[in-house]
Amino acid sequence: MQPVSNNSNGPTQEPQNITPFRPIEQLRIRMADTKAESDYAFFQSLLLFGEAISKTVVSALVAAIKDDPERNRYRLTYKLVRADGIGEWAEALDDVLLGPASQQLAVSAALERRQLTEKVTSGAWQHEAVANLVKAIELLEIEYEEIPVKVDLRKWFHLFAHLRNKTRGHGAHLSAVFSPACEPMHSAIEQIVENFNLFRRSWAHLHRNLSGKYRVTTLGGDPAPFEKFRQSKSEHLPNGLYVVFDEPNRVELMSANEQFDFFFANGSFKSKDFEMLSYATGEKVRTGSADYLLPTGHLPESETQGLGKLDLKGKTFCNLPPERGSYIPRSELETELSDALKDDRRNIVTLVGRGGIGKTSLCLRVLNNICPTGEFDVIVWFSARDIDLLETGPKTVQPHVLTETDIAREFVDLVEPAERLTKGFKAQSYFESFLGKGQLGRSLLVFDNFETARNPQQLFKWIDTFLRPPNKALITTRFREFKGDYFIEVGGMTEAECDQLVQTTSFSLRISNLITPEYRQALYQESEGHPYVVKVLLGEVAKSKRLVAIERIVATRDDILTALFERTYASLSPTAQRVFLTLCSWTSAVSTVALEAILLRPENERMDVSSGIDELVRSSMVEVLQSEGDQQLFLNVPLVAAVFGKQKLKVSSLKSAVQVDAELLMLMGPTSRSDVRKGIEARVRRLFQGIAGKIEKGEGKLETYVPILESIARSYPAAWLTLAEMYEEQRWDEAAKNALEQYLQNAPGSHVTSFTWKKLADLCGKTDDALGEVSALIEAAQFPNVSFQFLSGVANRVNRVIKTRLRVDSSEKQVLVRRLAEVMAARADEAESGSDLSPLGWLFMHLGERDRARQFAEEGLRMEPNHQYCEQVLATLDSRRAD
């Protein structure tokens, strides 16, 4: 058989590493098993095989439909997740190939389209597949519409649905009837499996690990298109099954479990979930239906969609949509944006912030103020918005432009260039030329809700490639990937701005008498100055006609939480999602040091927590707070985002792991915004004490927690002191010594005390490290604030070690001892007794400096006649002289 290529240009050389399509191979195995069992079982497995073939073909081709304003892919998916019969899948195939959806089918699906729609005669494999299925139908004595001489492969899917419904679905045939029909039906299926190009395409299952890379499981075809996902962390696709048409396309109507049992949408649709069926094992599972609840009719236009024509406003032609509602001035942001747009060095300006934070309103206010100045000759507004955030709640709307083609056509419709009527005119080429030459004078192109475009990364690159001065672009987006030449962060309102918003909104809702100063303050704190959240909360107060607990309101408005956060959350890497869920599991500010350490505990999958935190900050899902004293960073999740995260956590597979992490974080105690200024020291100590308590109760061993504790200490050196205490309590003296050494190596010099060095000397003594003990003692003696009596005690201990365990027979040891001796000699006038000076005499004796040893022994005797140890120094000196 001639190999079939993955393009529309006909047969080509088949890749050497092509693999069979795994779902088909599984069904073949099941079919072979049942064939040996009985003809009845064989026929039933053929029915299942045929259903799986039908659903695979339709699922993949639906996945190959590009996003479009009419939402054709969603319309078909909406229908198929509800389909309880295989006939509806055959009807959907007609729509994909010949109906409204066919206009959006990927160009690279041309070969599959031709194989399915081309009318062929006897001898073509498509004709043989249909003919064999007809033969099976005739042998089963099922009535059917006679097929013409020329037939297309589409007919096979309708005939199969008819056969299935007359046998397994509604018929009651005897087993003997099935036997002669098995062979032609088997041939009909194998003709498609062996020849249809779809089953030679590149298929894979993608699962993004916490590392940011994907676990790629090749399911069929050439694995090369998916290789980049194994290494790159920049790719971002949802987990699931993919087939390549130009690029990997997610097959929403199919899924796979961890054992790679493949499931197909199977109807039984409910408001929360629908059924998925495995044709290989017969197992059924339920999957969430939230993505398929919106009606399929034509959606209304967004309130922020640009006008359909360019009108003169002031000195500028523009199609700006009208400003909505009462706008609360945000003077600092307005000035910054206005200055950036007027600055010739800023070619692409980006407004970034959370959904509903006021980016579009800010943008419209500034542009309306600019129009009368004549700063720009033309301002063209393009909207990709798919959700209007109304005060009554979020409403899904029709995005106006999604692709480069949409933008170019919209621009041509607005500008109406004369050449558009000429033959061969191409809107996209015209727009690209305009971006570079600026035929209309100084122009500003505004792209609102940029992140909802079909491929925003590609679109940004396109704009950046062709845009040239004097033209400029302004982008509003929730994501920071599109920074351009100037980047403006739109955060929550200031307290004064928020107070003005509360006052204006409560007056319009006629609830001013209900809003107390305390409630107004709570609104600001809990909403983080988020204008849309404030409006919705006040709307709920108006409904209830009383003040309602803010968290309770938020928890009941799933629609708002989804509108504000779902798209941003879905765009996060698995690591960022994991960090976010952990932060949301406990209502408290959390130290970044502790968070990173706990998430990196050995039981968790390895992840780059720091990158995850950075991603959350860039996405405005968390805010960073800094303590005043130790300058440590804390993360705080705003209330509304935290409620969203808690709801996500309820159904997350990570729930149990997050709970363990949260329990450890809770050992640090709750941290409010005001507590952050106090720093991390007390909280780290509380965490360590909490872990020590768990160990004491038998809830784990110290070695289990060591990676967490040491990770914290590496980021916050003072924790090494507490960790040393824990190790010593467990009689891990060597580990305690190493912990103290780590502290001394990494702590700021001003934090180190003589006591710490003295403690290290004690641990060196316990671990029989004589040189380490002497070194630590001598370091302890270098601090100017220690008493001379302390120095004398240190010298006395050093002398004992030298006498019993350490010979001063190397230049290194000589240097150590001399450091101590010189420090004491310089402060000898502070000595108060012979006991203070006798150890110094011994030190100089070890150094071989007999005259200085005699000097300090005699000085000690003058202070304290007959002092035993001073006399011993002199006696030893005299005996050595005699020798």
Image (spheres, helix red, strand yellow):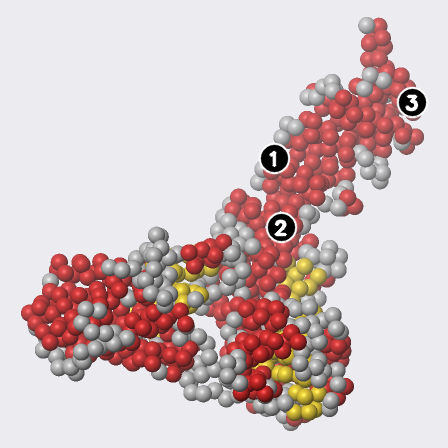
Label 3 neighbour load within 10 Å: few <14, some 14-19, many 20+? some
Of the pair 50 and 825, the residue shown nearer to us: 50
Q: Secondary structure at mark 2?
A: helix
Task: Name the quadrant containing residue 28.
Answer: bottom left
Pick whichever of labels 3 and 2 is earlier in the sequence.
2
Residues marked 3 and 2 touching at CB (< 8 Å): no
Relative to 367, residue 203 above or below: above
Residue drawn 40% across the image and 67% down it: 245
Depth check, mark 1 against mark 3: the one in front is 1
State the separation of the CA atoms marked 1 and 3: 41 Å
Of the pair 458 and 152, the residue shown nearer to us: 152
State the separation of the CA atoms marked 3 and 2: 51 Å
Q: Which residue is mark 3?
A: 859
Viewport quadrant of the N terminus: bottom left
Residue drawn 66% across the image and 28% down it: 769
The image position of residue 12, as x and y in percent, is 34, 60
Pick whichever of labels 1 and 3 is earlier in the sequence.
1
Instruction: Answer left or right for 68 relative to 345.
Output: left
Relative to 731, residue 77 above or below: below
The image position of residue 495, as x and y in percent, is 72, 78
Q: Give the numbered dot on residue 18.
A: none
Instruction: Answer left or right for 217 relative to 848.
Output: left
Relative to 364, residue 178 above or below: above
Instruction: Answer left or right for 68 relative to 49.
Output: right
Q: Give the numbered dot on residue 712.
A: 2
Q: Secondary structure at mark 1?
A: helix
Instruction: Answer left or right for 41 relative to 553.
Output: left
